[in-house]
Amino acid sequence: MNALTRALSGVLAVALASYASLGSSQASAGPTHRAAVQRVLDRLTGEDGGPGALAEIRDRTGVTKLTSGLADLRTGAPMTDDVRFRIGSMTKPFVATVVLQLVGEHRVALDAPLERYLPAVVRGNGNDGRRVTVRNLLQHTSGLPDYLTYLTPPDILADRYAHHDPTELLGIALAHPRLFEPGAKGRWSYSNTNYLLAAMLIEKVTGHAYGAEIKRRIIVPLELDSTSVPGDAFDIPEPHPRGYARPAPGAEPIDVTEFNPSVAAGSGDMISDATDVSRFLDALLRGRLLHPAQLAEMTHTRKTGLADHSSYGLGLFAWPLPCGGVYWGHPGDVLGFQTTTGITTGGRQATVMVNLDPGGTDAQDADIQAAVTTALCAPTRS
């Protein structure tokens, strides 16, 4: 173990000790706190324009589930708290966890060039797999263009059931110049291309589909019965709400529940529910899925430069809480659903979902984050 890893492991040990000790002292959501979160959900489905919303709040003393609005605009069915939904970029922590497990097994080296595992795959317009490391992929410091900048939701919906091969998606990205030198100081740019390549790396190293590795290594051991990597499957297992998109400001939402999620392979294709997402993050931060050295690497962050003052580790964001401290998690945006999940160092968790994306308002973006932070900033017992 080198000096950096020892240092990171020490920091992580302090964080996890705090996580364990604080968890039992935080109060579950009382009536006043539940009402505060409910007001934000009702705002999401009212003035913000979302069809339906849900929130699940968990700590060591219990679970609070809240809903608002509609699961189905056609039938008028209300949103319920037990539904599965597409989690979008919440997929990324699952993929990063598998890559870091392979690091712990000495099958992948974090600071090795991508070229070692995917030779001659990344080339063109200054993009070069010989200069991009595995760490760069997981931390969004590769400088690789995001293919979803050029493959837009209208493009996808024009042929929503089409299979998208990873090489096709990668080709879209590599047709454009790199954004910056991989690992350049102070540079960070979120790119779905990074996690498309991370999924390809998993398949190359293990000889199995990345979805099969996620299932074997995470879903089955944690008994995440509502979680899946759907491949080319168009539908979402029941029960689920309809997912909607708004094609233009003020337009009526259109139903985008069914489409081929291969367009988000490795970066945003998974399906889950609020309970499973929370259980996954809890297990991850408690060290049940990664060795201490790899968890320390995952939670070693760099500033993103985004307006939310976030930083990013290897597949996890860290955001400041308005009540003090930080929380770990990830947002997810995919056709039909916008989600965010977070967990504090004290073990309090919140997951929020609205069944509208893209086409949500700026207020929807702000209130999804507000619902999470309101849930996480619960008062403690005196």
Image: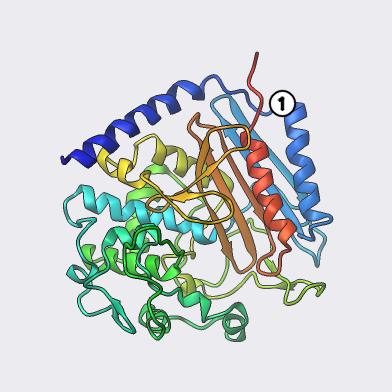
Residue lying at 55% horizontally and 41% vertically, measured from the top left: 320
Q: How is the image coloured?
A: rainbow
Residue lying at 25% horizontally and 40% vertically, measured from the top left: 293
Q: Is residue 290 above or below residue 142?
A: above
Q: Can you tell which quarter of the image residue 140 is in? A: bottom left
Identify the residue under disc 1.
30
In this view of the protein, which residue sits in the foreground, 375 or 297?
297
Q: Is residue 159 left or right of residue 179?
A: right
Q: Is residue 199 left or right of residue 230?
A: left
In this view of the protein, which residue sits in the foreground, 183 or 261?
183
In this view of the protein, which residue sits in the foreground, 244 or 170?
170
Q: Can you tell which quarter of the image residue 231 is in? A: bottom left
Name the spot of residue 375 as percent of width and height, x first: 65, 37
Residue 69 can be seen in this image = no
Residue lying at 27% horizontally and 68% vertically, measured from the top left: 132
Quarter placement of the N terminus = top left
Q: Is residue 302 above or below residue 50?
A: above
In this view of the protein, which residue sits in the foreground, 31 or 4?
4
Name the spot of residue 269 as percent of width and height, x first: 49, 65
Q: Is residue 317 above or below residue 334?
A: above
Quarter placement of the C terminus = top right
* Category of crowding for the residue at label 1, using alpha-carbon neighbours closer than 10 angstroms: few (below 14), some (14–19), many (at least 20): few
Name the spot of residue 314 as percent of width and height, x first: 37, 52
- Residue found at the far top of this picture: 382
Secondary element at image label 1: loop
Residue type beneath disc 1: Gly
Name the spot of residue 352 as percent of width and height, x first: 64, 48
Residue lying at 57% horizontally and 79% vertically, measured from the top left: 152
